[in-house]
């Protein structure tokens, strides 16, 4: 498993465009984990080499309290 890229910056315009492919809801950026988070779907999509990976099978399920 690769480690998160904590220095990745996400263009705010990208966050305005991208939606969760599962819930069709908005995403928030978790800088510490380098993920795009869908609270509604309870999934976190990784960002690899600066590219958001928006595949549900690659998303991490959010645990309790996340």
Image (cartoon, rainbow, N blue to C red):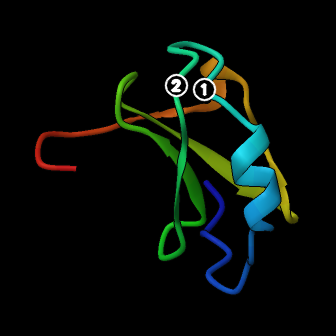
Mark 1 and mark 2: span between their CA atoms? 5 Å
Q: Secondary structure at mark 1?
A: loop
Q: Secondary structure at mark 2?
A: loop
Q: Residue furthest left?
A: 65
In the rendered image of this protein, does residue 62 appear above or below residue 19? Answer: below
Q: Which mark is residue 55?
A: none
Task: Describe residue 62's horizontal placement relative to residue 19 as left or right.
Answer: left
Tell me what residue is drawn at x 40 percent, y 22 percent. 41
In the rendered image of this protein, does residue 7 appear above or below residue 2? Answer: below
Quadrant of the snapshot with the N terminus: bottom right
Tell me what residue is drawn at x 70 percent, y 51 percent. 15
Task: Describe residue 65's horizontal placement relative to residue 62 as left or right.
Answer: left
Residue 39, percent from left and from top: 35, 36
Dot 1, crowdedness within 10 Å: few (<14), some or many (≥20)? many
Residue in front for this viewpoint, 16 or 32: 16
Q: Earlier in the sequence, mark 1 or mark 2?
A: 1
Question: Could you tell me if the residues under marks 1 and 2 are in contact, i.e. CB atoms within 8 Å?
Answer: yes
Kindly identify which residue carries mark 1. Answer: 20
Q: Which mark is residue 25?
A: 2
Please state which of the two labelled residues, at mark 1 or mark 2, is closer to the viewer.
2
Dot 2, crowdedness within 10 Å: few (<14), some or many (≥20)? few
Residue 63, percent from left and from top: 22, 40
């Amino acid at each position: 498993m690769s480690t998160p890229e904590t220095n990745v910056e996400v263009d705010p315009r990208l966050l305005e465009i991208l939606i969760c492919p599962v819930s069709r809801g908005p995403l928030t950026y978790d800088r510490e984990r380098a993920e795009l988070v869908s609270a509604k779907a309870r999934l976190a999509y990784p960002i690899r080499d600066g590219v958001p990976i928006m595949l549900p099978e690659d998303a991490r399920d959010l645990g309790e309290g996340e």
